[in-house]
Image: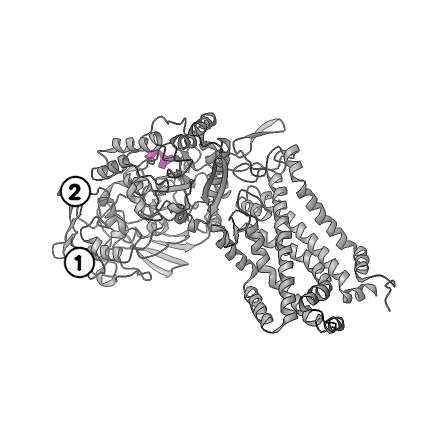
Amino acid sequence: MRGIGRALAVTGVAGALSAGVIACGSGTDSSSSGGGGKKTGGSIRIGSVLPDKYDPTQNQTIQAYQANQTVYTPLTTFKHVQGKGGATIIPGLAEALPKVSNGGKTYKLKLRSGLKYSDGSPVKASDFENTIKRLVVTGGPFSSFVNPIVGVDKLKSCKDDVKGIVTDDKTGDITINLSQADTKFPFAISETWTAPTPADKSPCKGQENPPPPGYGAYTWKIQNPSRQFTLTKNTDFNLPGIPKGNVAKMTVVKSSVEKMTQDVETGKLDFMTEDPTGDQLPEVRRRYKDRISLAPTPPNIYYFFLNVTVPPFNKIEARKAVNYAIDSRALQRIFSGRLDPTCNFIPKNVIGHKDGSCPYGDAAGAGDIAMARKLVKQSGTAGQTVTMWTNSKSPRPDIGEYMRTLLKKIGYKAKLKTLDQQVYFDQVGQKRNKAQIGFTDWFMDFPHPSDLLEPSVAGAALESSPTFNTSFVNDATLNKKIDDLVKQDPEKVADQYADLDKYIVQDKAYLAPYGTEQSTSFFSERMNAKECAGVHPVYKNDFLQFCLKK
Amino acid sequence: MGTEPNGLGPGRLALRRLRRNRSALAFGVLFMVIVALCVAAPIWSHHFAHIGPTAGDNLSQVTVDGKKKDVVSPDGVPIGPTWQGRYFLGAADGNGKDLAVRLLYGGRNSLLIGVGAALITTVVALILGILAGFLRGAVDGVISRMMDIVWAFPVILLGIALGTAFALGGVNLGVLTIGQDSKWVPILIIAIVYVPYMGRPIRGQVLGLREREFVEAARAQGMRPLRLMFSEILPNLSSTVIVFFPLMVANAILLEAALGFVGVGVRPPEPSWGTLIGVGVERIQTGPHLAIVPGVMLVLAVLGLNVFGDGVRDAFDPRSTIREER
C-alpha cells in the first residue's frame, strides 16, 4: 500500500548503503573541499516541498519522515550513521532491542525510565498501544505493517483493546504478540509512525497543528503547515547512541525545486530536500562539485512491469525479449546520469541483493536487439500491438517513449499511453485495464526484501485492487517461497532471497529491472557538506548529522 | 462622401480594402509561410534530417566540424544547434529526437487542431446563435444559459479540466467514442470552450437581423422559420464569420499550446508547439533554444493570424471603412 513505488511518496525507507557509495557517490560527485570542521550551534534554512502531513501516524513522504524522525523516537530506531550501519536497528525509547520468543511471535521491550515528552508529560508504556490504535483506526498509510499484531484486525475504535499488546506503565514493560512470525516487524517498530506520543494529547484522529508532542532531539513548531515550520534543539534530550543534533535551529520553508536550487546555490538556503531537476542538476554538479553528492538512497529499483495475463507478455519469450533489448545507457541519459544500471530486482544494499553476471548481458551495456527480435518471433507475438504505459512526472514520459521505440525495434506495433501521475498507479494496478507493459518503481520502506517482494510479485497482493503487482504474477512456487522466507531471519536466508531474485528476473522474466536512482544532497557554502551530509539509508538525509563549517 | 467606387458588392469592396492594408497582408503571408513550412515537414524529415518526428536515439553521435558528438550527453543534456541537416536546431529531449523535425510536425498538429477547433466552434456557434437569436423565448433561454455556464469558467482552466478528464479514458458519449490519444480530444475541448465567445455575438446579430425588412418580407411571403434562418439570416452572418474565424484559429492555437504545456493537449509522442515548449522549459538553462524556438514559431503564427484577422475585420466593418476611406 504505502510507498507504492512513488519516489516522493515513500517514507521510512531503509537500506544499507555501502560506505564507498556514500562517501564518494561517483568520481565526479565526491566532496573535495576541506570540510571546514564541525560547528555546534547556529541556524540553518532548508528548502522543501514540506511534509504531506505532520502527525507521524498519518504522513507518508520522505520530507515528513526526515523532519519527524528528529522529533519522535520510536521504541527502537535506526542508527544515525552514514553508510551500511545506518540500517542497523538500535534501542530508542526502549532500554534494549526486543527479546523475541515463541517462534518469533512475541516481542518483549522495556521503556527507559524517567523520559518526558516535549510537553513535560511522562513517557508511558501504554502510549505505544495508543499509537498503534491511532495508526490503525485512522487508516494511517503504514498501518498494514502492524497487522500481524494479535487483535489489530478487530480494532474498530481507539477505545477497543488490542489483545496483542500488553503494557505496564509502572514497570515500562511492553509485550507484543503477533499472530504469525514476521521478520519485517522489528523494522516496523523502528519507524516514527509507531513512536509513542502522549495518549491524552494524541486523539483518535489526525492531529496536524500542533502535532502530538514527542520525545526527540528536536521539538517542532508549525508556523504554517503549507509554508514553514521550525525544528528547535531539545536540550533535555538524552538517549544513548542517538545524537543530540549539531544545529540549534532549522527553519524549513516551502519552495519550488527550481527556486530552492537557485537559493542553495546563492546561500539563501542551506539545504534542499529535493533533487535538482532537468538541466539544473548537470549545472550544479559542474559548478559545485564540493557541495553536492549522489547516492542511491533510499534503496530503490526502477523496472518495467510485464503483464503475464495478457498477450504478448503471457509468453515468456516475449518477456525475455524486453529484458534482452533494454539498453541502460539510454535510460541513464534520460535520468540525467543519475541511474545505476542493474539486472537485479532486489536493490543494491538490501538483504538478498547479489551482484553477479547478468543473464541478459551487461546491465550497463548495449541491449541485444537481435536476440530480442529472435525471441519475439519465437513467441509468435511479432506484429502485435503493445501499449506502453507511463505517467506525466518527469522523466517518465521519456522513459515511456524509450520503451515504445524499443518495442517497435523488436517487432511490435508500439503505442504510448501517458497518464497523469496522480491516477497512474491506480489505473495500471487494475486488472480490467489490461496494461501490457509500463513504468514502475519501488523505494524501500526498510531494507527487508519482503518489503519489495510481497507487494510487487506475490499472489496475495492481487487481493487488493489496484494492486502494485502490476505484472499480475500469481506463481504458487514464488508465493510459497515468499511466505516461508518472511518468517525467517532475512540475513540468514539472504542467499534464498537472491535465488528468488534470479527466479523472478532470469527464470520467469516477470518484469524487467533496469536501474537504481541516485538521489542528491546539495548544501550551501557554509554547510559542512563533507562531514555532515548525513546521507542515510533510511532517512535519505539525517538532519541530526547536519552541521555548519567552523 | 466616401471614395468607394460605385457598382462593387460588399465582398469585393472588402477585398479591395484588405489589399490596401499592407501590414495585414504581410502578416497573412507570414502565417502562410509558416503553414507551408509545416506542411513541408516530411520533406525536411526525409531528405535533410533523415529522422522522423517521434524517432530518437539518445546514444547516437553526429559529426560536427569533423568531430563526433553525443546527441545526448551522459548526464542527459541534448546537443545544441549543429547547423546541419540532422539536429539543425539540436536535439529536442533526452531521447534524442530532432528539434527541427518535431518543430515542423508540431506546427502541423498545432495548426490542424487550431483550424479544426475553430471550424467546429464556428459551426456550433452559428447553429446555436441562430437558433437562440431567431427563435428567442425558451430556446434562447436554454442556449444562452448554457453558453453563460461555459463562459463563467476561465478558458484555460476549463480546457485543463476537460483535458485532464478526457486524457484518462478519452471521450465516450455512446455513439461518439474517441480514444485518449486522438487529436480529436484537444480539438473538441478547444471547440467547446470557445463556442460562447462566437455564439453570443452571433446571437446578438441575429436578434437584430430578424427584425430587418427583408426578413419581414420573406416571412410575409410564407417562408418557414428553418428556411428563413438558413437562406436569409445565415448569408448575412458571413462577414462576422470571416472576421471571427482567423481570430478563433489564433486563440485555438494558443489554447492548444497552453494545454500541451501542462500535458493535457496532444498526447506524446506526437509533438505540438505547446508540448515542445513544455519540454524545453525543463532544460531552459542548458538549452534555452528548446523553449524559445517553438515559442517564437507560436508567437509568429498567432501574431500573423491576429494582424491578418484585424485587417479582415477592418475590411468588413463599415465603421472601419469610414475611418480608412477618409
Q: Considering the numbered disc 2 on the image, is that residue within a helix, a strand or a loop?
A: loop
Image side of residue A422 versus residue B273, left or right: left
Foreground pick, A520 / B103: B103
Judge whether A228 appears above or below A32 on screen: below
Callout 1: SS: loop
Task: Write down the chain letter for disc 1.
Answer: A
Magenta region: which residues? A1-25
Q: Nearer the viewer, residue A199 or B305?
A: B305
Q: Which quadrant of the view contains residue B120?
A: bottom right
Q: Which residue was labeled with disc 2?
A: A104
Residue A15 seen from this side? yes
The kind of residue tagged 1 is Asp
Instruction: Provide residue A364's location: percent of width, then percent of height.
Output: 43, 29
Most frequent secondary structure within the magenta stretch: loop
Dot 2: chain letter:
A
Residue under numbered circle 1: A161
Taking the magenta stretch, the answer to whether it contains residue B63 is no
Residue A429 in sight here: no
Residue type, label 2? Gly
